[in-house]
Amino acid sequence: RLEKMAQQRGLRNMQFFPLQSYDALPALLKMGDCHLVVQKRGAADAVLPSKLTNILAVGGNAVITAEAYTELGQLCETFP
């Protein structure tokens, strides 16, 4: 579906790849200049996003949206 949307909009700066092995995850995460971690409003305190741990484990940068009162929001305030 995303591939079709990108094609319809003429987006040439996107690439799509087949499913990758879990072993390739660290290398794939290192490729990104910045990662986006978005938490749904109201459901944000249910879990800490596991993708964030993986991103930080490889030294990645992340832009995070979280409500201030959640655990993730408090972590962002403590460790900007």
Image (spheres, rainbow, N blue to C red):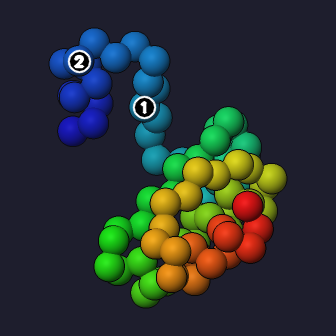
Instruction: Let me know if residue 21 appears in the view.
Output: no
Q: Quadrant of residue 27?
A: top right
Left or right side of 8 for 38: right
Q: Quadrant of residue 73?
A: bottom right
User: Please, which residue is most extreme toward the bottom here?
Assistant: 46
Judge whether 55 appears above or below 11 on screen.
below
Residue 35 spot, x, y in % from top left: 59, 47
Label 2: how many Cα within 10 Å (few below 14, some 14–19, many 20+): few
Label 1: how many Cα within 10 Å (few below 14, some 14–19, many 20+): few
SS at badge 2 = loop
Residue 77 spot, x, y in % from top left: 67, 70
Question: Which residue is pictured at 42% across the width and 67% down the height?
Answer: 39
Judge whether 71 appears above or below 61 on screen.
below
Q: Nearer the viewer, mark 1 or mark 2?
A: 2
Question: Which residue is pictured at 46% across the width and 26% down the height?
Answer: 15
Judge whether 12 appears above or below 50 on screen.
above
Which residue matches tag 2? Answer: 9
Left or right side of 2 for 33: right
Which residue matches tag 1? Answer: 16
Between 36 and 17, the one nearer to me in the picture: 36
Of the 4 image quadrants, the one containing the C terminus is bottom right
Q: Quadrant of residue 58?
A: bottom right
CA gap, disc 1 to disc 2? 15 Å
Question: Which residue is pictured at 21% across the width and 28% down the height?
Answer: 4
